[in-house]
Structures are given as C-alpha cells and as structure tokens.
Image (cartoon, rainbow, N blue to C red):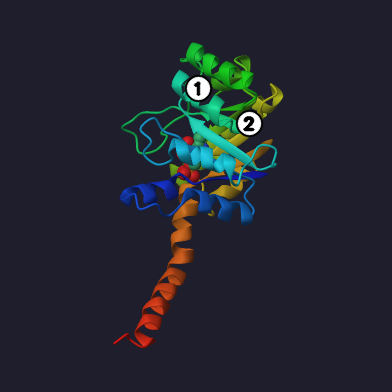
Amino acid sequence: MRLHINIDHVATLRNQRDAGYPEPLRAAYACLEAGADGITVHLREDRRHIRDADVLALRAGPLPPGSGRVLNLEMAATDAMAEFAVQARPDVVTLVPERREERTTEGGLDVVGQRAQVTRVVERCRQAGIKVSLFIEASEAQVRASRELGAEQVEFHTGHYCDAPVQERPALLERLAAAAELAHTVGLEVAAGHGLNRENVAPIARLPHLVELNIGHSVVADAVFSGLGEAVRALRAAIDGALAAPRAS
Ligand code: PXP
C-alpha cells in the first residue's frame, strides 16, 4: 500500500506569518524518512498554502525523477494548471474540483459533467509523460468516464464516509468497495483519501484493490501533539542556558 502524505497544512502554518518556517521541504524529508512512499501537495489557484516554488523545490530536493518516491500534484482541471504541471513534471497529477470559497476539497470531480475540459487536461499531462489520477465520488458513471477519457488511476473521496454517523458507514463502505471493484475491472488503479486518520483508516485500507492512500490534515494535527512537548523542552533549555551563562559586563 502506497502512503502519500499531504503536507499542505505545513505550508498553511508557514504562510500565516510568512516567516519562512515551518518549511514544507523539511516536512517532506521527515515524512519520507518515517516511511511515506510519496508526498502530495495541492497547488490551489489562490495559492493559499502550497506555492509554485514549493512544488519545484520538492522535485529538485527530496523527490527527484526516478527516485522511486512519488510527487503527487493535486490541481484543478484547468489549462493554466496543466501548463504548470508540464513544467514541474510531478510523477502524478491528481485532478480535483476546486472552489475558491471552500475550506477543503468538498466533493469529487464531475468527470461526466466536465468531460471535455477534463479530457483536455488529461491528454496534456499524459503527453508530457505524467500519470493522471482523478479524484471522484464512488459512482459507476464517474468511474467509467474516468477510464474512457484516459486516466490511469482514480482516487475515491472518503470524506463522506469519515464524516458519517457510525450506523451509516457500512452502506458507504459498500459503495466504495463496489466502485473499487469496478475501477479495477476496467483497468484503473485505485486510491482513496480525504478525512482519514488513525482511527478510521482500517476499513478503507482494506477496500478491494486499493493501492494508495493520501492523508494530510490528521497527520499534521497529530504531529502537533507528538512534537509540542519536545518543542517546549528545547525552548526551556535555550532560556535556562542563556540565564546560566555569565553575562558580559
Ligand atoms: N486526496 C485529495 C485528492 C485531497 O484533495 C486531499 C485534501 O487536500 C486529501 C487527499 C487529503 O485529505 P486530508 O487532508 O483530509 O487527509
């Protein structure tokens, strides 16, 4: 199972002050060292977290072509983003729906309704040798359309499953499993992501034919608490060290 960590929210924190830290690049190295198979970033049209330079730096640093580690670039299905992807050359482009006013990606891409535009972007990326994944709802029509227009992978949106009351989850899981079966049958690789964390990931990881998970927000949130104690200890040591040192007279 490939595990790709989405580091958008490291960039969110950096951008809040524009102080240059925490650096997404450093986060990428840490994730890879800890066992992630790749890094996922969403370059939004408003550049609210990840910026163009971050994507290029990830490619030049921890994720060079041919390294076996994956740079997965999530982006809207627009011609401008396709041109950026062709320059940046990630291993994979994941096309997602995007609305400026949303806080996070709220649903799957409507591959059926936006077929002409999605096809154009898929073709442009594939001509440049970039694998294309489409972030969609678990629906038969969306899976079939994804295959027909040339995608190699679909990523199922798991947000509804994660947000649903416990009694509604089995039906949603069944729907995801049926879509995963169909995707595999028509020759698509199967990924999943959105809203996943340590508590809810197990049933999703066991979906049939699933080969990849993309997880971000919960990892960055968990990292706050696994790192906060250490950060305070280091700060306390720096202050105590300063006070213990002789003062220049
Ligand atoms: N996969 C896709 C296509 C996404 O858009 C996102 C959110 O940017 C994720 C996975 C990760 O979702 P989360 O941050 O909730 O783990």
Which quadrant of the structure image shows residue 149?
A: top right
Q: Which mark is residue 243?
A: none
Can the viewer see residue 27 in this picture? yes
* Quarter containing the N terminus: top right
- Identify the secondary structure beneath mark 1: helix
Image height of 69 relative to 199, above or below: above
Q: What residue did someone put label 1 on? A: 83
Taking the spot 38% from the left edge, 86% from the top edge, the residue there is 245
Image height of 170 relative to 130, above or below: below
Amino acid type assigned to the residue bearing label 2 in the image = Ala
Q: What residue did someone put label 2 on? A: 180
Which residue of the protein is positioned furthest toward the front in this rendering? Answer: 249
**Residue closest to the eye, 187 or 2:** 2
Q: Going from the N terminus, do you reach mark 1 or mark 2 first?
A: 1
Image height of 20 relative to 74, above or below: below
Taking the spot 66% from the left edge, 37% from the top edge, the residue there is 65
Mark 1 is surrounded, within 10 Å at the Cα level, by few (under 14), some (14 to 19) or many (20 or more) other residues, namely some
Amino acid type assigned to the residue bearing label 1 in the image = Glu
Q: Are marks 1 and 2 in contact (CB under 8 Å)?
A: no
Residue 169 coordinates in the image, percent (x, y): 51, 41
- The verdict on label 1 being within 8 Å of ligand 1 is no
* Quarter containing the C terminus: bottom left
Q: CA distance from mark 1 to mark 2?
A: 30 Å
Can the viewer see residue 158 in this picture? no
